[in-house]
Image (cartoon, rainbow, N blue to C red):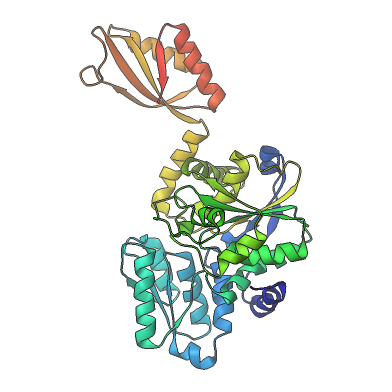
Amino acid sequence: MITLRDVDEAYQAIRNAIYHSPCVLTQSLSQLTGCQVYLKLENLQMTGSFKERGALNKLLHLSETERARGVIAASAGNHAQGVAYHARQLGSKAIIVMPEATPLNKVTSTRRYGAEVILTGRNYDEAYEEAISKQQSEGLNFIHAFDDEKVMAGQGTIALEIHADGIDPEAVLVPVGGGGLISGIAVAVKELYPRCRVIGVQTKQTPSMKYSIEAGRIIPMKSKPSLADGITVKSVGHLTFPIVQKYVDDIVLVDEEEIAAAILTLLETEKTLVEGAGATPLAALAYHDLGLQGKRTVLILSGGNIDINLLSRIIERGLIKDGRMVRLRVELMDTPGQLAIVSACIARYRANVLEVYHNRSFMNAALGKTFLDITLETRGGDHVQQIISALGAEGYTVQKL
């Protein structure tokens, strides 16, 4: 297992090349959650995520001869960019194998940082197999995204920065995929702050670490699509697993709607753009009872490399989760003037109509009746309930879709 000494050595090695990201107290999220919430803004790193910490530490521990031969990695995004950027800074050739479905912006960024990108495979696991094959055939040095002691120690430098900022955390919430980030942080946090709770956060789509911890052995899982694509890892690391077993207090699962709402909250209240994985700590704190009321709680916002093409859909899902966008189905008589009555009722409560769908033939309404599907922009759940009650008072049957 890695130790605090390993993490400190990594910190001394990379500190002049890595941004000491801010860890800021947020009054708005503190009020929202009832905790003293600090945000560790790893989305502000040069490549947009924490991954470059571990990548750089691994690169620095290669000999000059090894770096001259070149390095290879498999990644769907953040690890790729971290390896590419720092390999170029150190004068080393980097090859990154990425799944064919990797978003274009991540492929473009990785190439911009100087790496050769190979697109192959339907998912990370197939890309990983190709990277290992190429590493063996060409004598390259493989840099694992999480299951490597130097990588884990590099990620743990985040905890040393929190310590240097004098925050004295009582809880730290960390996104969990393969376990590299939380392993490094947990080792350092537990040695510096033995009473501090370390809580991992995974998506319900691929809870590989949580299920493995509960079973007492590594259990590979089928990876499912998620907004938190950076942590949808089929199988956790053999090196990370025992560290998580020893040091991590709990692992919480969050769903897609909670992640979307957390992205929206950070964007709207903190003016901070994070990717799905980076939003999972807030999703856990905001929507789950973790028993952290009043405690100094640090959320690791692990990255900000979100696919812009998905952002509008994520914002929309966040608005729905927050109750500020809703679709109602109103049953009404198929007579003139009904639409005007419904519209006037909604207007009285100052809701904004975004979309209206009215079709007599294909909505299975009883003869003499019809359905009106109407999408509204509202102020939240209480506002929606006021509108539903008002329509009910007019004699309409209303269903929230």
- Above or below, 291 against 400 in this view is below
Q: Is residue 202 visible?
A: yes
Quadrant in which the N terminus appears: bottom right
The answer to whether residue 296 is left or right of residue 383 is right
Could you say where residue 397 lies in the image, as x and y percent from the top left?
40, 12
Could you say where residue 341 lies in the image, as x and y percent from the top left?
39, 10
Quadrant in which the C terminus appears: top left
Name the one closer to the observer, 248 or 122. Answer: 248
**Residue at the spot x=51%, y=59% of the render?**
177
- Above or below, 216 against 365 in this view is below
Q: How many marks?
A: 0
Residue that extends furthest to the left in the rendered view of this protein: 361
**Residue at the spot x=39%, y=71% of the render?**
128
**Residue at the spot x=79%, y=61% of the render?**
166
Residue that extends furthest to the front in the rendered view of this protein: 216
**Residue at the spot x=47%, y=7% of the render?**
393
Q: Is residue 45 visible?
A: no
Could you say where residue 241 lies in the image, as x and y percent from the top left?
56, 64
Name the one closer to the observer, 324 or 10. Answer: 10
Could you say where residue 240 lies in the image, as x and y percent from the top left?
57, 67
Q: Quadrant of residue 139?
A: bottom left
- Above or below, 197 against 179 in this view is above
Q: Quadrant of residue 127?
A: bottom left
The answer to whether residue 374 is left or right of residue 293 is left
